[in-house]
Image: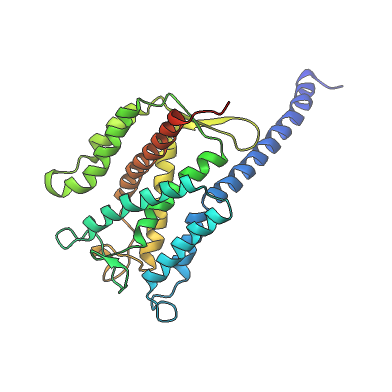
Amino acid sequence: MLTAIDKHLLDTRPRQIESLRRWALEFLYFGVKEARACLFVGLFMVAMLVTPRAGVLGIPRYDVLLVVAVGLQLWMVWARLETWDELKAVCLFHVVGFALEAFKVSSSIQSWSYPDFAYTKLFGVPLFSGFMYATIGSYMIQSWRLLDLRVRHHPPYWMAATIAILIYANFFTHHYIGDYRWYLAACALGLYSRTMVTFRPLDRDRQMPLLLAFVLIGFFIWLAENIGTFWGVWRYPNQLGAWSVVHLSKWSSWSLLVIMTFTIVASLKHIKEKIHVPGP
């Protein structure tokens, strides 16, 4: 004879199995959509790994990577994997990233360096480098669309923009007036403490704290940076003799940069919604 406990277990077991299957299916769809959002990131990383340091057919490595990056972006637009508006945003991230690179690589700062020759170097920085920042923007734009992202309790846009500008400025000014990243991180923590991002892996809405997303994306960028420096695409001063793991403090820098990138994407979408006039 079955006891009440046995009957309860028999009743709940199918629901548990169904819940587990549901979770696995949603996780699979989430992974597929994330992989799709990382298309430009992934292909560009593969190009960095497979392009020989000596270049291809006499073309220096950095120049090859620039051609690959531009070609990938044009292909994505042609294949309708990316819109022209999204391409414009990617170009904006390229400009923002290149400006930071030019400053960091300058002779007075030398935070890192690009050791190889290239015809397309400007201020000591190969032009392809801006696309490394553009990959972050591309990922955010793509995931926003593919996962139907919605943001709850977004802070006032002028406050978010102010923090983003200060974060970007601190990457420059900390060489002269001190590093205020932790103060800015604390401000961002307070600003986004209530902010949740809602996304749809399959057919149900899920949500997570936006701050957690910032930290997770920053961590994966830090991993990618280790891969890039290991392959010698660029090097920090302490890696010139022999490669070593990029300092963990860079994780915080990347997380702050992710906040700035997200703010740009969110602001562009906000502006577009405001100026969009529905048809009759």
* Residue 52 left/right relative to 129: right
**Residue 183, position as x, y percentages in the image:** 23, 34
Give percent across and percent down for residue 142.
51, 45
Q: Residue at x 47, y 61 (%)?
A: 44
Relative image position of residue 13 (x, y in whole percent) = 75, 30
Instruction: Kindly identify the residue that appears in the image at 31 percent across and 49 percent down.
Output: 96
Outermost residue, left side? 177
Please count the marks in the image. Answer: 0
State which quarter of the image contains the C terminus. Answer: top right
Residue 78 found in image quarter: bottom right
In the image, farthest residue toward the bottom? 58
Side (left or right) of 129 relative to 138: left
Q: Residue at x 39, y 62 (%)?
A: 228
Q: At x 67% / y 41%, what residue is drawn?
A: 25
On the question of residue 214 being in view, the answer is yes
The residue closer to the viewer here, 68 or 55, is 68
Say above or below: 192 vs 91. Answer: above
